Image (tube, rainbow, N blue to C red):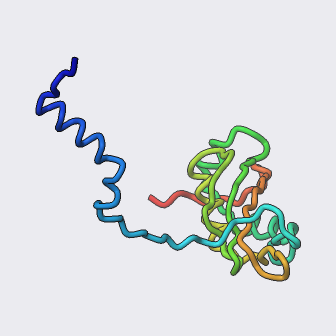
Amino acid sequence: MHRRLSPISMMYLSVFLLLPTAHVWAQQPKTVYKEVSDPIYKTVDTNPDFPGGIAALQRYLSTNLIVPIEVKAAIDSEYARVVMSFIIEKDGALSELLFLQGIQEEYNELIKDVLIKGPKWVPALLNGEAVRYKFIMPISMNVEKLRTTRLKK
């Protein structure tokens, strides 16, 4: 005994049978290519360096990091220690500066500004060519020796 399909059932059946071939009739979307930036490396042949080395970086920070008295007073330890992550670009410029561990927002921003305004780093090398490099760096400063200024009102 055969049962006759209703018009609605026939419509659902036709749609179901046509679905697998629908892509043939549908307009294919245009492929959009995004420009992929250069990769960021963590392992290279030659590590990046601050011009003059770590001792020069320490001198640069102690000379150029000037902290408002109120910010210095709010630091409740002997050493102000932050851990930063940033990208050293092929030309030695710094980008994507992030704090993995910070003290307080004002102090963090001061360090960030001093680093961005500083000299370009010697970039990392891979197979003799400059590459982008992800650098993680702790910065520890003796709070007592921090240079200070008054906040402008």
Q: Quadrant of the C terminus?
A: bottom left
Q: Position of residue 26 (x, y in %)?
A: 29, 60
Q: Residue furthest left?
A: 7
Side of 11 where 39 appears, left or right: right
On screen, 147 above or below 94? above
Which quadrant: the N terminus? top left
Seen from this angle, which residue lies furthest top?
1
* Residue appearing at x 88%, y 68% in the figure: 55
x and y percent of residue 142 in the render? 80, 51
* In the image: residue 14, left or right of residue 115: left
In front of the other: 51 or 47: 47
Front residue (pair 52, 16):
16
Residue located at (76% from left, 70% from top):
60
Whole-percent x and y of residue 124?
80, 73
Farthest-out residue, front = 1
Residue 76 located left or right of residue 48: left
Place of residue 102 in the rendered image (x, y in percent of width and height, measured from the top left): 66, 46
User: Toward which corner of the image does residue 132 lie, by quadrant?
Assistant: bottom right
Q: Nearer the viewer, residue 84 or 66?
A: 84
